[in-house]
Amino acid sequence: MKPLNLYTSIARFVEQISGATKLKRRAIKVVLSFFLTIIFIACNEQNHNLQLGEIEQSFDEQLVSISQENDSVSWIGSAEGDVWRISTHTKQHFDISDDRIYKVVVQPLPNNDTLCWIGIRNKGLQKWQLSQGKLHHISSYPIPFKGVNYSVYDIISTQNKLLVATSNGLFCLPFNSECNALQRLYPTKTDPSCMG
């Protein structure tokens, strides 16, 4: 049925019911035309065209963090302990924990490998190495009185150390030290809120 015939049929029906005049019938046609046009436009499926350099990805779980390695590579952490390395053409998945991945900070290594500092809920700061497409656990870093049972919420890598924001304060890990534990920066031992 053509749209014009549809409008005419509806207008005639309305005229019979309400005794509408020719002027009212035209007004009804205009209003019906307007509403039907809106409905047709609203139901029209629009395609989103990606811009140059834009990548669309989908995930089947809750994402918790995103960190950037460089202009074309990002790291995603999930609520279920998964980590993804996303680049322009690849999406690598690593299952490394059973709890939230709050932060991933990476450092390139000379042999095309990547060092990953990963902050995990209730499992602390961990060092992993990405080599030949596989992620290998290297070390976990305890803090005083908690061991590795703490959460890391943020990590900043400077030239000579990592700064680590945790559930128990601010810590650092000097790169040139042989120390295998985080050193407390805040609160200090003289601060009454310090636990140890």
Image (spheres, rainbow, N blue to C red):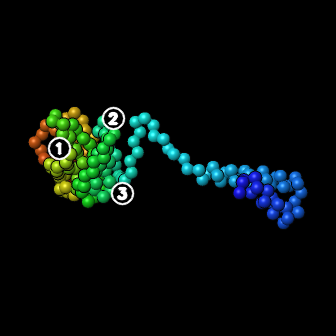
1 to the left or right of 178? right
SS label for mark 1? strand
Q: Position of residue 40 (x, y in %)?
A: 64, 52
Of residues 26 and 68, the one nearer the viewer is: 26
Dot 1: within a 10 Å radius of its alpha carbon, few (fewer than 14), some, or many (20 or more) residues?
some
Q: Amino acid at mark 2?
A: Asp
Q: Position of residue 140 (x, y in %)?
A: 17, 51
Of the residues under marks 2 and 1, which one precedes in the sequence? 2
Of the residues under marks 3 and 2, which one precedes in the sequence? 3
Labels 2 & 1 near each other (Cβ < 8 A):
no
Q: Position of residue 10 (x, y in %)?
A: 77, 60
Of the residues under marks 1 and 3, which one precedes in the sequence? 3
Q: Amino acid at mark 3?
A: Glu
Of residues 46 and 112, the one nearer the viewer is: 46
76 to the left or right of 143? right
Labels 3 & 2 near each other (Cβ < 8 A):
no
Q: Position of residue 94 (x, y in %)?
A: 25, 52
Dot 3: within a 10 Å radius of its alpha carbon, few (fewer than 14), some, or many (20 or more) residues?
few
Q: Residue at x 27, y 40 (%)?
A: 156
Q: Is residue 72 visible in the rendered structure shown here?
A: yes
Q: Residue at x 32, y 48 (%)?
A: 76
Seen as rendered, the residue at the extreme front is 1
Q: Residue at x 78, y 50 (%)?
A: 30
Of residues 153 and 77, the one nearer the viewer is: 77
Where is mark 1, residue-wise?
A: 131
Where is mark 3, residue-wise?
A: 61
Distance from the alpha carbon under mark 1 to that under mark 3: 26 Å
Q: Which mark is residue 71?
A: 2
Q: Amino acid at mark 1?
A: Ser
Q: Residue at x 20, y 48 (%)?
A: 135
